[in-house]
Image (cartoon, helix red, strand yellow):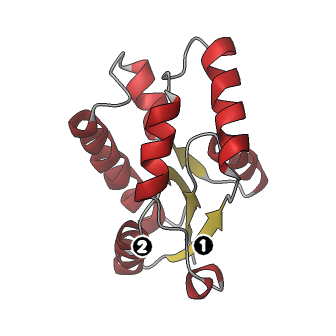
Amino acid sequence: MPTLHLICGLAGAGKSTLAKQLEHQLPALRLTPDEWLARLSLDGHDIEKRAIVETMQWEIAARALTLGIDVILENGFWTRRDRDDFRARAALVGAKTKLYFLDVPRDELWRRIALRNETSPDTFKIKETDLNEWLTWFEPPTEDERAE
């Protein structure tokens, strides 16, 4: 049975690193909104454009899962609602899901983001105020979600 791998965590948590490792280990199709937005020279903070890219990526993911191919989505999945939604979508196409939660302390997240801001010209710049705001939005997965 194909698996939809959901990478959950805030900016700087290591989602891309894990997704790239899984892509080769499993193997699986990896779909990452930030990479598409950057490639299209779009603002990574543009919520409307991000939603369009994520919709397109889901269409590709659903087809791949239907064909029996594992898929990795690196959307962050900041809320229980998002995670539940994608679990339901996977079930509709006959796939199971696996959640990977990257739980990194706030100060380490900021250290990584600040370093990335300085050294990676191809990534979207993130301000510390952005991180602080996102921390108030983020809903860590509950124990029942992690036990899947």
Marking on residue 44: none
User: Hey, what amino acid is under mark 2?
Assistant: Arg
How far apart marks 2 and 1 lie (CA) works out to 14 Å
Earlier-in-chain disc, 2 versus 1:
2
Secondary structure under tag 1 reads: strand
**Which quadrant: the C terminus?**
bottom right
User: Hey, what amino acid is under mark 1?
Assistant: Lys
Query: x%, y% of residue 140?
Result: 54, 68
Quickly name the residue at label 1: 98
Query: x%, y% of residue 8?
Result: 56, 59
Residue pictured at 30% horizontal, 45% vertical: 56
The correct choice, above or below, for 148 with respect to 108 in the image is below
**Which quadrant: the N terminus?**
bottom right
Residue pictured at 41% horizontal, 66% vertical: 79
Secondary structure under tag 2 reads: helix
Q: Is residue 143 in sight in this rendering?
A: yes
The local crowd at label 1, few if under 14, some if 14 to 19, many if 20 or more residues have their Cα within 10 Å, is some
Horizontal placement of 77 versus 42: left or right?
right
Quickly name the residue at label 2: 80
The correct choice, above or below, for 36 with respect to 139 in the image is above
Residue pictured at 38% horizontal, 61% vertical: 62
Q: Is residue 20 in sight in this rendering?
A: no
Closer to viewer: mark 2 or mark 1? 2
Do the numbered discs 2 and 1 sit on residues whose CB atoms are within 8 Å?
Answer: no
The correct choice, above or below, for 6 with respect to 38 in the image is below
Query: x%, y% of residue 142?
Result: 56, 80
